[in-house]
Image (cartoon, coloured by chain):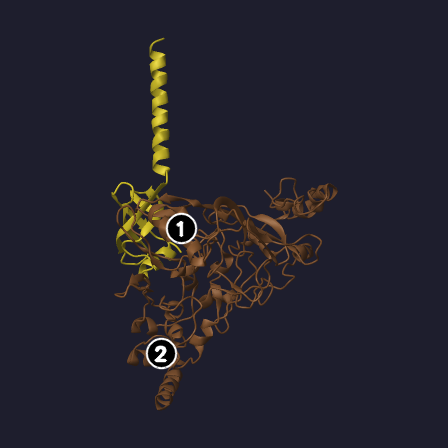
Chain colours: A yellow, B brown
Amino acid sequence: MKKVFPVVLMLAVLAVSTVAFEKTASAEDVKMVGSITKIEMASDSASAKVTLKDSKTGENVVVTVADESTLDKFKDKRIVDGDEIRSKFDNQDGKNVAKIFKKTAGC
Amino acid sequence: MVKKIAVSAILGVVLSASLVSAKEHAGKEYILKNGYQGPKTCETCHPGKAKEILGTVHWKHASKVDNVEGLKPGEEYGMKNRIYTMCNGNDIVNNLKEIPPNQLGQTKFSGCNTCHLGDHTSEVGSTGPQAEESIDCLICHSSKYDFSKRKPSKRADGTIIMGQDRSTEAAANLSRPTSKTCMVCHETAGGGVLVKRGFSVDPKNDVHVANKMVCIDCHQVKNHKFPTGYDPNNWAHDGERISCAGECHTSKPHKNADLNRHAEKIACQTCHIPKTGGASAKDFTKWEKQANGFWEPSTLRREVNETKPVYAWYNLTVANRPTFIGPNGSRVDGKSKIYPFKIFQGKAYFNKKTGELMSMDFAPPMANGDTLAGVASAAKILGIKDYEPVPGWQTIYFGSNHLVGPKKNALSCTSCHVPNGVLNFSELGYSSKEIQKLTSPELYFEETVKGQEEW
């Protein structure tokens, strides 16, 4: 009993911390700076999938953008392929959904 | 003359037909038939408008300034020539140019005057036929402007020009400017979206926008002159001023008489714009290398509504010193009200020999981080030979005049009239005895408890 209890306790702590870690990981926002390689507007124009090439890692990340102001910028080409973007997103149902999506450039 | 009569006749027919579809521009058919040749096409029906805009702040980026200390009388000031630490460059020293190659051998075009109505063949503030011809009417007036055309490029002779969309499609689709039109430039001032002023023109953050208003509903333009407020850091103006009290809101806008009494000494913005945002500090003496190989000034960024304002008395005249730009005013001058301000602090180089703030040509530091090379280049452009650059800080109070939240977010009695409230009564000039009274619930307890939501 004396030997079993610490092991059980350790396992319990491990289980709780794993669950906690998982919860934290899935709720965490991701921030990145990257350049646009592709913009795909949805057929209803209510969202767009944007592929960003991460400036640090070189990896492609697909981010879904749904805010009206940014979608308008895609339509009139204020934001185009090649523009550098600062984005913050989180994962919702397997999709990276943008909370912030802004060009880094300014005057 | 014959051509003008013919055009007028065509327009007359078009106008009567267009009564059914009131939103269509009367000149659409003419433009579709004849194409667009720049401002002279617009001037067919709007003569004199090109010359008119050359006299405004949007073209000159400067004006006579009547409410700021220490300026030379008769001179004009604005982003054309000002030296301060939100930008530290201006149209003169940071003129649109190709920057030197960075470590990766890359260059790009950059300059303060990328936000200008011209195509860079004529300088900011220039006059004459060439200047008139270079105006981009469509960037404000077209509802189908292709912004991908609005980028700098180098001509064969080495001149850097700013592209414009002068397509027939853009010219044939005209409408009243929306907020998007203004935000093309005004959203990205200071080095990126939301950096300078930290306000986002969207319904979530501003009740005027939520009520479908656009910028020019308040900034009611006449002859291309835009009425503006008295932001201590926004000096250039078109001679027309704007305030909350006017067409929509009177000087006694509340049903509650106590609140109207507050409005005699407290600006509308103080209660109705309780937060601000945008960059809080920048360091132009130390630039950071970005992943793209270019360098940018180090910037402490803040989002919309992330920052608490500071409150000060303001009589609409501006203190202008090398280390401080901000409101003049006091409790007792009879002209001041308490306004909210966003505090920004910028680090740049001062001239040790004169104490004056120096400006910076961004091209060298953007390429390789060499800030002193930027200072040297700017000094050369301005003809300053005797200088010794030393780093120092400047504090700037920016006006907080946008981001008007819904009524429920406005400051209330318990925002200010408590010991730990948002107003620093001592700094505002109140005595200890007065502060004791001002922070006592005696002032508002009965009324507030009556209005409290019942559980």
Classify residue B244 by image quadrant.
bottom right
The residue sitting at 51% across, 50% down in the picture is B276
In this rendering, position of residue B149 left or right of residue B46: left
Left or right: B429 as drawn, with respect to A61:
right
- In what element is the residue under mark 1? helix
Residue B307 picture location, percent across and down: 51, 46
Identify the image quadrant of the N terminus of chain B. bottom left
Protein chain holding label 2? B
The answer to which of A44 and B421 lies nearer the viewer is B421
Amino acid type indicated by mark 1:
Gly
Q: Residue furthest top?
A: A2
Q: Residue at x 43, y 60 (%)?
A: B92
Would you say residue B210 is visible in this rendering?
A: yes
Who is closer to the viewer here, B160 or B401? Answer: B160
Residue B161 x %, y %: 32, 65
- CB contact under 8 Å: marks 2 and 1: no
Label annotation for residue B352: none
- Identify the residue at image location x=34%, y=22%: A14
The amino acid sitting under disc 2 is Thr
Q: Which residue is mark 1?
A: B374
**Foreground of the two, B297 or B41:** B297
Q: Earlier in the sequence, mark 2 or mark 1?
A: 2
Where residue B292 appears, as percent x and y from the top left, is 30, 47
Pointer 2 residue? B41
Q: Secondary structure at mark 2?
A: helix
